[in-house]
Image (cartoon, helix red, strand yellow):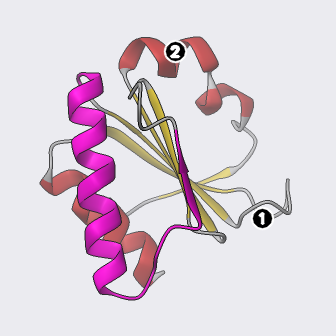
Amino acid sequence: MEKLNLITRLLEEKKAEDIKVLDVSKATNIADHFVIASANSPVHARALAQYLSEKLEEKGWKPDHIEGYEFGNWILLDLIDVIVHIFTPQWREMYGLDWIWSESVREEK
């Protein structure tokens, strides 16, 4: 929970919007939680991903890999037990992860 709390706090600090934390542990074995957040532009999404990556590494939580950074419309940070998805609003709506994982438990942070 410490990691999830830190992730959501860091995203909020840099003005991410509509942050959702989903417990996907019963639906998949790829991670225990998804964090989904919106950025207002690809530049904002890259800034969020960079900031999040740097601050998590300071705590010893280095992402296993990062995808989508170059274009910035959907950036995925894989922390093994937590996967962070940072979207621009149009891409978030188009891919519908909130809907796809709607059966997962939403956690309040």
Disc number placed over residue 25 in the picture, else none = 1
For residue 40, above or below residue 81? above
Neighbor class of circle 2 (other Cα within 10 Å; few <14, some 14-19, many 20+) is: few
Q: What's the residue at 59%, 32% (across, down)?
A: 98
Q: Residue at x 51, y 15 (%)?
A: 93
> Is the residue under label 2 in contact with that under label 1 (CB below 8 Å)?
no
Name the residue furthest bottom.
60
**In the rendered view, would you say 38 is above or below 90?**
below
Report crowding for label 1: few under 14, some 14 to 19, many 20 or more residues within 10 A (C-alpha).
some
Residue at image point 43% right, 60% down: 108
Q: Which mark is residue 69?
A: none
Measured as percent of width and height from the top left, residue 14 is found at 15, 49
56 in magenta: yes
Amino acid type indicated by mark 2: Glu
The alpha-carbon separation of the residues under discs 1 and 2 comes to: 23 Å
Q: Overall secondary structure of the magenta stretch? A: helix
Query: Where residue 87 appears, x then y in whole percent?
Result: 42, 30
Tell me the magenta residue range.
40-67
Question: Which circle's residue, 1 or 2, is located before the other in the chain?
Answer: 1
Disc 1 marks a residue whose amino acid type is Ser
- Asked whether 70 or 77 is in front, the reply is 70
Question: Relative to 100, is 80 above or below?
Answer: below
Q: Position of residue 27 (x, y in %)?
A: 85, 53
Q: Secondary structure at mark 2?
A: helix
**Residue drawn at (44%, 70%), measured in percent from left and top?**
4
Q: In the rendered image, which quarter contains the C terminus? A: bottom left
Dot 1 falls on a residue whose secondary structure is: loop
In this figure, which residue is indicated by the disc labeled 2?
93
Q: Nearer the viewer, residue 9 or 30?
A: 30
Residue 49 covered by magenta stretch: yes
35 on left or right of 31: left
Q: Position of residue 13 (x, y in %)?
A: 14, 56
